[in-house]
Image (cartoon, grey):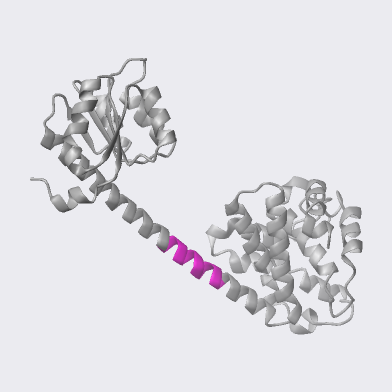
Amino acid sequence: MINRTDAGELKGKTILVVDDEEAIRGVVKEYLSELEVIVIGAESVARARVCLKGFNVDAVISDIAMPGGETGIDLLSWCRKEHILAPFILVSGYITPDDVRFALSQGVQHVIHKPFKKIQLIEAVLSSFAASDSYNNLVNSYIKEIELNQQLFMAAIDGFAAAIGARDGYTLHHSEQVAAYAVLLSRKIGLDEKNVQTARIAGKLHDIGKIGVPENILLKKGLLTDSEFNVMKSHPGKAAEILGSLPSLAAVIDGAKHHHERYDGSGYPDGLKGDCIPLMGRILAICDTFSAMITERPYRPAILPARAREEIRINSSTQFDPKLVTAFLSIPEIAEA
């Protein structure tokens, strides 16, 4: 028995019927008329692809064997490659076990054998939409959970950054600025949004190791002695230790640990050279230095952005990755600062 409530929920849905026989397409349209759905027909896989690109199709009912060398299985495969996840029902007079296995692996809810009865088709359509709705609800719930976790994660990152900045007024502003520059540079060189987000987090946390630096060194107004500078140089390693328990932050750890490496190999903590320095470390090296130069520090005044840009340019290939320098200096927000 057909549940009328379920049937009513399909009103206005668009269903694509793919079959080389016009009579079959007509029968399917007649059978589905009581569902008040919109039925469009295609006589071949090629025509079906055109329909799928031109219409918002909610479900596909397709024969398997069709002229032109392409089958309903080919259409199914194309739909999944194109991320068309509409419910898909296969109809055929003959189907092999391999076809069935492949169809099920691609999310086909039903395979109906010809000749079929009206009730078979309607129940298959109804259950396919029910399964699709259930899947979409599950996906949406996962997305909401991920978004919530992401919000909590970023709140924790901001908490870390605030903890660093609480020790001196400079570090929090500096970390936010480095994060902003790192985002701009990452986008400039074509990194995807996941890695741009990593750059933002790395910028915020690159100085987290300074939590372990005594305040008499961290806040000293004069130049550091050699022994004091050695203590200050320990902060990238401490950052890696603090963040090391979070394997999902591997690239962030790379940035925090290696933002004081130099392209010529004379930096610290590991004396890495050239492309052996992780990309996130090379990105942050430029962003960190530029921000530090244009910001007033206890031991020296800020310099103008134009002079800071020139310092970055002068130290290309020695302190900084030359390709990243070119990209950084071409960013409008940097070039016009």
Please identify the residue farthest to the top as the structure is shown: 68
- Name the residue nearer the viewer: 306 or 158: 306
Q: Is residue 288 above or below residue 219?
A: above
Q: Position of residue 288 (x, y in %)?
A: 77, 64
Q: Magenta span covers which residues?
A: 145-156
**Residue 155 falls in which quadrant of the image?**
bottom right
Q: Position of residue 30 (x, y in %)?
A: 18, 32
Q: Main secondary structure of the magenta part?
A: helix
Q: Position of residue 14 (x, y in %)?
A: 31, 40
Q: Is residue 80 left or right of residue 249?
A: left
At 82% from the left edge and 63% from the top edge, which residue is drawn?
Answer: 290
Please identify the residue farthest to the bottom as the structure is shown: 216
Which of the image's four quarters has the C terminus? bottom right
- Res. 261 visible in picture: no
Q: Is residue 116 left or right of residue 96?
A: left
**Residue 34 falls in which quadrant of the image?**
top left
Q: Position of residue 112 (x, y in %)?
A: 18, 30
- Name the residue nearer the viewer: 187 or 292: 187
Q: Is residue 235 above or below residue 3?
A: below
- Name the residue nearer the viewer: 155 or 298: 155
At 90% from the left edge and 62% from the top edge, which residue is drawn?
Answer: 306
**Is 287 one of the magenta-colored residues?**
no
At 73% from the left edge and 65% from the top edge, which residue is drawn?
Answer: 178
Q: Is residue 297 above or below residue 337?
A: below
- Name the residue nearer the viewer: 29 or 238: 29
**Is 153 one of the magenta-colored residues?**
yes
